[in-house]
Image (cartoon, rainbow, N blue to C red):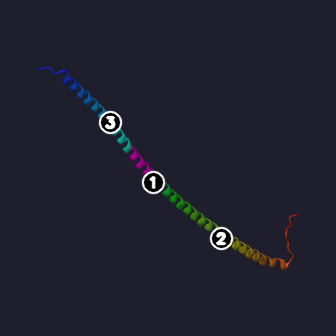
Amino acid sequence: MPEIPEGVKAVVDYFISIGLTAAVVGGLVSWIVNLWLSERIKGRIKSEYDEKLETHKAQLKAQGDIELEKLRIELNTLAARKQFQFSHLHEKRAEVLADIYASLREAVSAIREYTKAFEAGGECHVRSAEN
């Protein structure tokens, strides 16, 4: 095999070193660009999901507030019903007491009528607490 002249060998070595350097630099640039792009995509995805999460949180809070207000209204309605029933209960108690009072007055009047016959016929013998 023929000998390669020194000048050609130097040029070939120079091109090989430039090629290797370019390959290494190209690989590093490619890796850095790939890393930068993936981080940028991750950032966009995170931003999108954070926005969706905040929207979802706001919707859940709004729904929770609506449900809470519905429960408060229902509770107030039930309280008003119970208060209404309770007030009618007092009215019924008053009616029952009035009926009992009327019945007692009738009973006292009937007893008075019944005992009149004994008082009119003679002396009334009533034992006192002193005897």
Residue 73: image quadrant is bottom right
The quadrant of the image that shows the C terminus is: bottom right
Q: CA distance from mark 2 to mark 3?
A: 93 Å
Residue 6 versus residue 82: which sits nearer the camera?
6
Q: CA distance from mark 1 to mark 3?
A: 38 Å
Looking at the picture, how far across and down is residue 93, in whole percent?
67, 69
Instruction: Say whether residue 30 is left or right of residue 66.
Output: left
Per the image, label 1 sits on a secondary structure element best described as: helix
Q: Residue furthest right?
A: 130
Q: Which residue is mark 2?
A: 92
What residue sits 47% from the left and 56% below the top? 59
Instruction: Say whether residue 58 is left or right of residue 27.
Output: right
Per the image, label 2 sits on a secondary structure element best described as: helix
Compared to 34, does 66 lie above or below? below
**Front position among marks 1 and 2:** 1
Which three-letter amino acid code belongs to the residue tagged 1?
Thr
Residue 94 versus residue 24: which sits nearer the camera?
24
Q: Which residue is mark 3?
A: 29
Q: Which residue is mark 1?
A: 55
Looking at the picture, how far across and down is residue 13, in whole percent?
23, 25
Dot 1 alpha-carbon crowd within 10 angstroms: few under 14, some 14 to 19, many 20 or more: few
Per the image, label 3 sits on a secondary structure element best described as: helix
Which three-letter amino acid code belongs to the residue tagged 2?
Lys
- In the image, the segment drawn in magenta is 42-60
What residue sits 39% from the left and 47% below the top? 44
